[in-house]
Amino acid sequence: MCGIAGIFAYSPVNQSLYDALTVLQHRGQDAAGIVTQKDGDFFLRKSNGFVKDVFRTRHMTRLAGNMGIAHVRYPTAGTSSSAESQPFYVNSPYGIVLAHNGNLTNADGLSKSLYQSDLRHTNTTSDSEVLLNVFAHELQVQGKLQPTEEDIFAAVTGVHDRCRGAYAVVAMISGYGIVAFRDTFGIRPCVYGERKNADGKMEYMFASESVALDAIGFTLVRELDPGEAIYVDNEGNLHSKVCAKFASL
């Protein structure tokens, strides 16, 4: 298993994501990674090792921005190479980063179809990189210069149509927001929570376990439903939808 976390806030999230990973460390000790976003730019640090060893002060100061996702890895697929540490990044469309907990049982077939039909190349044997490219392709076929929440939900529906197995995902789309979603059977856990900042604005967090929410002051709202996606746009508006055509509710 792996651990995932994602935060939308109105102040820097680098320390909060680090703290979340420390309490999710039991879910994966192979590698750790954090990506933050500021003004449409991504800032990434990831490597093999424990959370406390991967992130030093010099790394943390570079992780600028009020939105980010994070991951601790236990290698159930692929290899233990640092190249397969997460989150993964793809530049088209828009720029997307993604972290994933789970296993795709049809990853090999998807990898072939990504290359032969979608004209996308994956650089590792990780099924998480496959899932990222499926999501990116499904978002690209929506054909929007500025995607709406319905375009993002349609892309998640495309992921559910093509991907088999268990997955809980957090992803960021450069300039647009953060999205979390679960497989249609709800096999892998994903919860979300809320908190109000000093100005009364609502902030949101997603994680594999509620203990990560507790550690940094978020209140658990609920677990995501099987097949559900929750999208928080850049303005802090929350949108949710069950995107699977057949979900085990």
Image: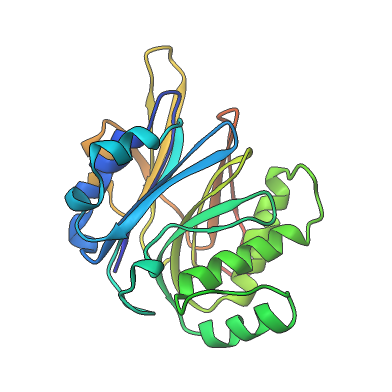
Asked which quadrant contains residue 74, the reply is bottom left
Asked if 188 appears above or below 197 in the picture, the reply is below
Asked if 16 appears above or below 46 in the picture, the reply is above
- x, y (%) of residue 17? 32, 41
Q: Residue drawn at (63%, 39%), measured in percent from left and top?
A: 176
Q: 31 or 136, which lies in front?
A: 31
- x, y (%) of residue 11? 41, 24
Q: 106 or 30, which lies in front?
A: 30
Asked if 62 appears above or below 54 in the picture, the reply is above
Q: Residue drawn at (44%, 53%), measured in percent from left and top?
A: 224
Asked which quadrant contains residue 202, the reply is top left
In which quadrant will I find the N terminus?
bottom left
Q: Exactly how many numbered labels are in the figure?
A: 0
- x, y (%) of residue 191? 37, 49
Would you say 47 lies left or right of 175 here?
left
- x, y (%) of residue 246? 60, 70
Q: Residue drawn at (17%, 60%), measured in percent from left and top?
A: 26
Asked whether residue 3 is in view, the answer is yes
Q: 219 or 9, which lies in front?
A: 9
Would you say 242 lies left or right of 2 here?
right
Asked which quadrant contains residue 218, the reply is top left
Asked whether residue 219 is in view, the answer is no
Asked if 161 appears above or below 214 in the picture, the reply is below
| Residue farthest along the top direction in this orientation | 199
Would you say 176 lies left or right of 226 here?
right
